[in-house]
Image (cartoon, rainbow, N blue to C red):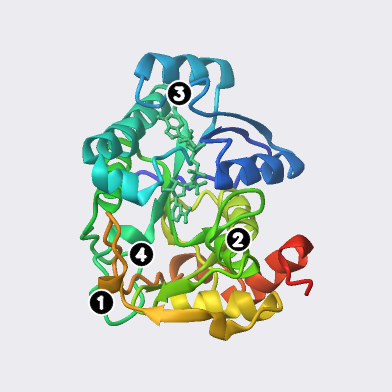
């Protein structure tokens, strides 16, 4: 009598051989540090040594790293550049991801692909679940969604992690820009009708470090809890850094001329990871922690 094959669960992993793409970026660099501290064998590359749009170059990097798991962070992330150069966005975020997925296939490696709130159209009236259908409205979001589909089509073992509005130490981010402009006494005009969740890379990295040990492949939304408009986010950062929050004036997206049009309401709900105990703290607490570690950003007047 035929009986179904036993369900083989991929066990949770202890030590892993991990390769990080985009390792010089905001997220990749922090993942390298955290996962090395956690005891994994971690290597990484960035565009200066390996261009993900070149399969031969990707193949060589995989041959020397021999990864079991690849954390794919490399991307064109400048949304306005992507709007002005949509083919470049597709080449890097779409076909570059295809090259990474093909190399994963050849090595039998699992892939963790980082995606974005910008795959959604922003017309929803509740936070987006992991299972909602993407419908990107700009080139960046479209190219990242192409990457998502390639990963899902080509690989049996993947984590697809969407996140939003990252702020990290050591790179340019929204908080640093707002506080720098405030410190220079410059006028601040920030939009009220773009709403999502600010997410601290330290918290995201901690959540990813836990997720990759579970072997529970699937789609995840890893963001700090809660949501804010860009305007409310700016006001909160100003206040916590010792500036007058009234320094920032509200405007609408229609008044803010830029090449890329963001989704208006792209709050991600962490449903799936929360079921296995992986949650991130509220975004306000994350901003507080970020500022505590960046005393130079505070108003010293
Ligand atoms: N930042 C956010 O708010 C945010 C929000 C949601 C999702 N994400 C996603 O999270 C991931 C990491 O974002 P991040 O903020 O850390 O980005 P990032 O700081 O821009 O880092 C991306 C890295 O990839 C490199 N890169 C670009 N093109 C490449 C290529 N052809 N080959 C190899 N490397 C290449 C970049 O080099 P160059 O700097 O020289 O271009 C950069 O070092 C991305 O997949 C992004 O889509 C980011």
Relative vertical location of residue 246 with respect to residue 280 in this rendering, above or below: below
The reply to whether dot 4 and dot 3 touch (C-beta < 8 Å) is no
Looking at the image, is mark 4 or mark 3 earlier in the sequence?
A: 3
- Picture coordinates of residue 246 (x, y %)? 55, 85
Q: Quadrant of the C terminus?
A: bottom right
- Picture coordinates of residue 5 (x, y %)? 36, 43
Q: Image point 76% across, 68% down: which residue?
A: 292
Q: Image point 51% across, 19% down: which residue?
A: 61
Give the labeled residue for mark 2. Answer: 176
Mark 1 to mark 3 CA distance (whole Å): 39 Å
The reply to whether dot 1 and dot 3 touch (C-beta < 8 Å) is no
Callout 1: 10 Å neighbours few (<14), some, many (20+)?
Answer: some
Is residue 123 or residue 253 the one in the foreground? 253
Give the labeled residue for mark 4. Answer: 130
Mark 4 to mark 3 CA distance (whole Å): 28 Å
Looking at the image, is mark 2 or mark 1 earlier in the sequence?
A: 1
Q: Quadrant of residue 207?
A: bottom right
Left or right of 39, for residue 177: left
Looking at the image, is mark 2 or mark 4 earlier in the sequence?
A: 4
| SS category of the residue bearing label 2 | helix
Relative vertical location of residue 114 with respect to residue 17 in this rendering, above or below: below
Tag of residue 124: 1
Looking at the image, is mark 1 or mark 4 earlier in the sequence?
A: 1
Mark 2 to mark 4 CA distance (whole Å): 30 Å
């Amino acid at each position: 009598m035929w009986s179904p094959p036993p369900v083989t669960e991929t066990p949770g992993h202890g030590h892993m051989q991990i390769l990080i793409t985009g390792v010089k970026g905001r997220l990749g660099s922090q993942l390298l540090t955290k996962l090395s501290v956690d005891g994994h064998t971690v290597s990484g590359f960035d565009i200066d040594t390996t261009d993900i749009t070149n399969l031969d170059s990707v193949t060589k990097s995989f041959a020397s790293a021999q990864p079991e798991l690849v954390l794919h962070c490399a991307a064109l992330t400048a949304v306005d550049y992507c709007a002005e150069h949509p083919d470049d966005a597709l080449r890097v975020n779409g076909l570059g991801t295809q090259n990474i997925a093909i190399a994963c296939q050849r090595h039998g490696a699992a892939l963790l692909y980082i995606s974005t709130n910008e795959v959604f159209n922003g017309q929803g009236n509740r936070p987006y679940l992991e299972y909602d259908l993407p419908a990107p409205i700009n080139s960046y979001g479209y190219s990242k969604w192409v990457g998502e589909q390639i990963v899902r089509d080509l690989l049996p073992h993947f984590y697809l992690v969407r996140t939003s509005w990252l702020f990290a130490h050591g790179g340019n981010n929204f908080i640093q820009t707002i506080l720098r402009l405030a410190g220079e006494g410059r006028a601040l005009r920030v939009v009220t009708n773009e709403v999502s969740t600010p997410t601290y890379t330290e918290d995201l990295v901690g959540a990813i470090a836990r997720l990759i040990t579970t072997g529970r492949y699937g789609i995840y939304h890893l963001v700090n809890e809660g949501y804010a408009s860009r305007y409310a986010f700016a006001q909160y950062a100003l206040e916590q850094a010792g500036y007058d929050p009234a320094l920032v004036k509200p405007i609408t997206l229609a008044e803010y001329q830029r090449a890329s049009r963001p989704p208006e309401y792209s709050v991600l709900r962490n449903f799936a990871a929360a079921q296995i105990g992986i949650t991130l703290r509220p975004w306000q607490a994350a901003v507080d922690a970020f500022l505590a570690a960046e005393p130079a950003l505070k108003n010293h007047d």
